[in-house]
């Protein structure tokens, strides 16, 4: 069967490209052998930045793609993938408008989601934010489009002189263009050990589908790789990885202490950079301490609400009872909270370099033990601004496109370069560019 475009991977990038490509009249075969296993989109917080979107503008927020780029470059100096950064930044308002206006997606601007590294409120999702809900909407939208054929078999892919041949148990598809959208390699221990040795064996709280298989296809076809040591860490993950607190507690005023009751990091460095810092504490654990006033601001944070439902958040009326419940030295915790209170009132500079504490923490206190995890990898196939995959000489590989975790991300190098929202920003923004470039 002939089709205009074959897409490998029905996650954030693959489903977005499928919807945007079919809207241009193209026929699409969308192949995903693990369609019934939660992918990274389904596991994610679902939060994506779209600086300058019409939704954001109508809330009265002043922002622009340039302002987001500026934040990205300040957050990850010298580590930004300039091949795609500007293209993605300017695509995001268009991609958001496409979802809302052309596809009737229930996407909203979320005026209460603060994120480290972002000087503006610019996150979008369904409300309350949930990657699972966004995934369900995408899946149904793809299923309803007659020009999208959704195939849940594994495909054997070969690249011929004229086209790509994708053989499944049911059918064989021929396409002149292929989009590699199978995600990253976080669930592939050999690749993690090779490219991110510092996280070899670490908890992976992303999807088991991230085996690097579509990246391997691009590599076999001569693609260049970029930023392979980059990853999104998650320093607010619960042991076991099933739930997490989300990224917003530190910017709202929360702190982290170790088993000895001592702070060890400027907590608002971002959830990704936080992961290795938490892992460096005793047993790789830290107690995230905040209060009921902060919790009241997390109503739109799906990840936090799930953690509460899972019984992961403790409540205490005093520092002494918090220390007892958490098993932390009470005298040290009292000293730490007294110091933090002084810092929050501007009475001293933080020796750990944190600039803002947002509020003085008051009872009732909330707390939760967290660890550091590898959420998803950022390195991948280097593309140009429209998602066409490049070889080491900088030439495009004819007919081969990539987006999402399979493609090189927006910024790299360890955990530090990941600005919150970069994952879906790239999946949707680069996905939009790919869909416009397909013929
Ligand atoms: C815990 C966690 C929280 C996150 N929170 C956020 C957030 O709030 N905001 C944000 O921007 N990003 C977040 N991310 C990152 C975000 O989820 C990813 O960047 C995004 O899902 C990448 O899209 P993708 O399409 O590449 O991957 P996925 O959404 O995982 O989709 C890839 C699909 O490809 C399929 N596949 C794999 N191999 C093959 C193959 N060989 N053939 C066919 N199909 C294949 C898989 O089954 C899967 O369905 C989070 C990630 C995690 C793990």
Image: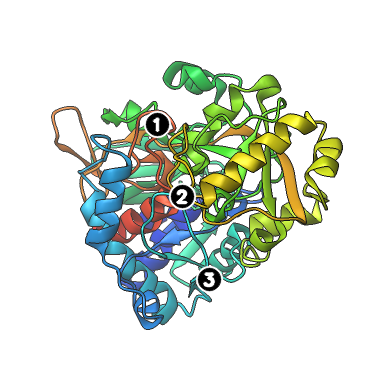
Residue sitting at x 68%, y 35%: 335
Q: CA distance from mark 2 to mark 1?
A: 27 Å
* Number of residues whose C-alpha sits closer than 10 Å to that of mark 1, classed few (under 14), some (14–19) or many (20 or more): many
Q: Considering only vertical position in the picture, is 363 above or below 282? A: below
Answer yes or no: do the residues labelled 2 and 1 have beta carbons within 8 Å? no
Query: What is the secondary structure assignment of the residue under circle 3?
Result: helix
Viewer-side residue, 438 vs 68: 68
Where residue 101 sits, quadrant-wise, is bottom left
Q: Earlier in the sequence, mark 2 or mark 3?
A: 3
Please name the residue that numbered disc 3 is placed on.
141
Q: Earlier in the sequence, mark 1 or mark 3?
A: 3
Please name the residue that numbered disc 1 is placed on.
230
Residue sitting at x 36%, y 58%: 119
Residue 344: image tag? none
Q: Nearer the viewer, mark 2 or mark 1?
A: 2
Query: What is the secondary structure assignment of the residue under circle 2?
Result: loop
Q: Residue furthest front?
A: 347
Percent from the top left, x then y, of residue 319?
78, 44
Residue sitting at x 41%, y 34%: 416
Q: Is mark 1 within 8 Å of ligand 1?
A: no
Q: Left or right of 327: which side holds 291?
A: left
Please name the residue that numbered disc 2 is placed on.
356
């Amino acid at each position: 069967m002939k089709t205009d475009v074959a897409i490998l991977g029905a996650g954030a990038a693959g489903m977005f490209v499928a919807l945007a490509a079919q809207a241009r009249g193209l026929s699409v075969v969308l192949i995903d052998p693990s369609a019934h296993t939660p992918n990274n989109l389904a596991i994610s917080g679902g939060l994506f930045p779209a600086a300058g979107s019409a939704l954001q503008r109508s809330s009265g927020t002043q922002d622009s793609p340039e302002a987001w780029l500026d934040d990205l470059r300040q957050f990850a100096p010298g580590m930004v993938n300039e091949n795609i950064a500007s293209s993605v930044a300017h695509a995001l308002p268009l991609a958001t408008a496409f979802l809302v206006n052309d596809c009737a997606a229930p996407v909203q601007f979320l005026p209460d989601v603060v994120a480290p590294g972002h000087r503006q409120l610019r996150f979008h999702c369904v409300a309350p934010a949930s990657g699972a809900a966004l995934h369900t909407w995408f899946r149904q939208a793809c299923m309803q489009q007659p020009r999208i054929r959704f195939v849940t078999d594994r495909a054997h892919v070969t690249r011929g002189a004229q086209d790509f041949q994708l053989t499944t148990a049911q059918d064989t598809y021929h396409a002149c263009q292929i989009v590699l959208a199978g995600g990253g390699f976080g669930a592939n221990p050999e690749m993690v050990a090779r490219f991110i040795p510092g996280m070899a064996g670490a908890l992976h709280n992303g999807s088991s589908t991230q085996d690097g298989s579509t990246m391997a296809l691009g590599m076999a076809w001569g693609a260049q790789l970029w930023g392979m040591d980059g990853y999104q860490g998650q320093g607010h993950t619960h042991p076991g990885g099933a739930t997490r607190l989300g990224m917003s507690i530190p910017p709202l005023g929360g702190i982290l202490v170790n088993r000895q009751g001592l702070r060890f990091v400027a907590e608002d460095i971002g959830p990704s950079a936080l992961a290795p810092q938490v892992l460096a504490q005793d047993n790789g654990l830290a107690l995230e301490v905040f209060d009921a006033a902060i919790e009241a601001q997390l109503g739109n944070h799906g990840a936090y609400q799930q953690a509460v439902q899972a019984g992961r958040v403790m409540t205490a009326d005093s520092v002494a009872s918090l220390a007892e419940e958490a098993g932390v030295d009470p005298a040290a915790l009292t000293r730490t909270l007294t110091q933090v209170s002084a810092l929050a009132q501007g009475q001293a500079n933080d020796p750990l370099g944190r600039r803002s504490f947002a509020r003085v923490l008051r009872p009732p206190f909330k707390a939760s033990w967290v660890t550091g995890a590898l959420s998803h990898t950022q390195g991948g196939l280097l593309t140009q601004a429209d998602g066409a995959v490049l070889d080491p000489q900088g030439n495009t590989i004819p007919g081969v496109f990539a987006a999402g975790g399979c493609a090189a991300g927006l910024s790299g190098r360890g955990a530090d370069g990941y600005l919150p929202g970069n994952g879906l920003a790239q999946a949707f923004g680069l996905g939009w560019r790919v869909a416009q470039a397909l013929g």
